[in-house]
Amino acid sequence: MGAVGLLYVGAVLFINGVMLLGWVDAKSAAPMNIFVGGLQVLTPTYLIFTANGDQNTILQASGLYLFGFTYLYVAFNLLAGLDGTGLGYFSLFVAVCAVVFAWLSFGRFNDNTFGVIWLSWAFLWFLFFLLLGRNQAGLGRYTGAVAAIEGWVTGAIPAFLLLTGHWGENDNARAIGLAIFFVIVFGALYPRLRTPAPAPSGASVESPQPA
């Protein structure tokens, strides 16, 4: 993924994350989703048409559409007030594809850092599926926090490092460090931000007392 495109993926993930946290009005997030969604559709189209049949270039470009269509889908949902289940199940498709791209990054492209990043995106898009496709509203704030953090850690920061030539060569250490960061931070946030599902009508939420 190009560093410039990665920077703006970071921006839209951050905006969508703080929207889910309730800090940004939903419709006000739509323009950024349109801008970045359009960019992530036009860019891979250009790359594919100019790839001269290079299969690795075409393969890597194909992953950008997953993001572009997600953000455009989000924008349409926000502006038209559409039901979120379609976007949720598309997010499941993206999550599965992201696992495949992670496997390709580890093996075919020998890029362990982006293998870990693709896995983190797979996790985030699976959360989108649970939140929207399966209506697990209790995951809203947690999903928002994960999205906002990934906007910086998988988007903006790597983009700036790549653009300024400070990415470095120590791929294995960077990948391990990222994986540890994600496990610790996302694991710690889950019990703090997940909202328990409401108790069924008429049911007591108190612990049963012994007879």
Image: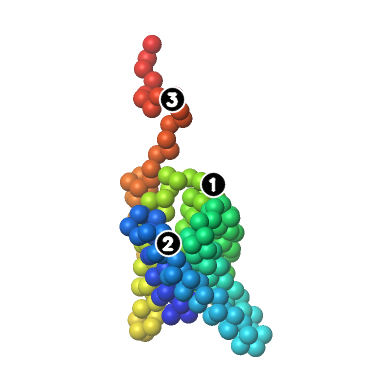
- Against 210, residue 67 (above or below) is below
Q: Earlier in the sequence, mark 1 or mark 2?
A: 2
At label 2, the amino acid type is Lys
Q: Which residue is mark 3?
A: 203
- The residues tagged by marks 2 and 3 sit, at their Cα atoms, a distance apart of 36 Å
Position of residue 104 in the picture relative to residue 141 (left or right): right
The residue located at (44%, 70%) in the rendering is 31
Dot 1: element: loop
Q: Position of residue 179 (x, y in %)?
A: 41, 61
First of labels 2, 3 by sequence position: 2
Q: Which mark is residue 27?
A: 2
The local secondary structure at tag 3 comes to loop
Task: From the viewer's perspective, tell me whether residue 115 is left or right of residue 183.
Answer: right
Q: Position of residue 130 (x, y in %)?
A: 51, 49
Q: Residues under labels 1 and 2: Cα distance?
A: 22 Å
In this orientation, which residue lies closer to the viewer: 39 or 44? 39
Q: Position of residue 201 (x, y in %)?
A: 45, 28
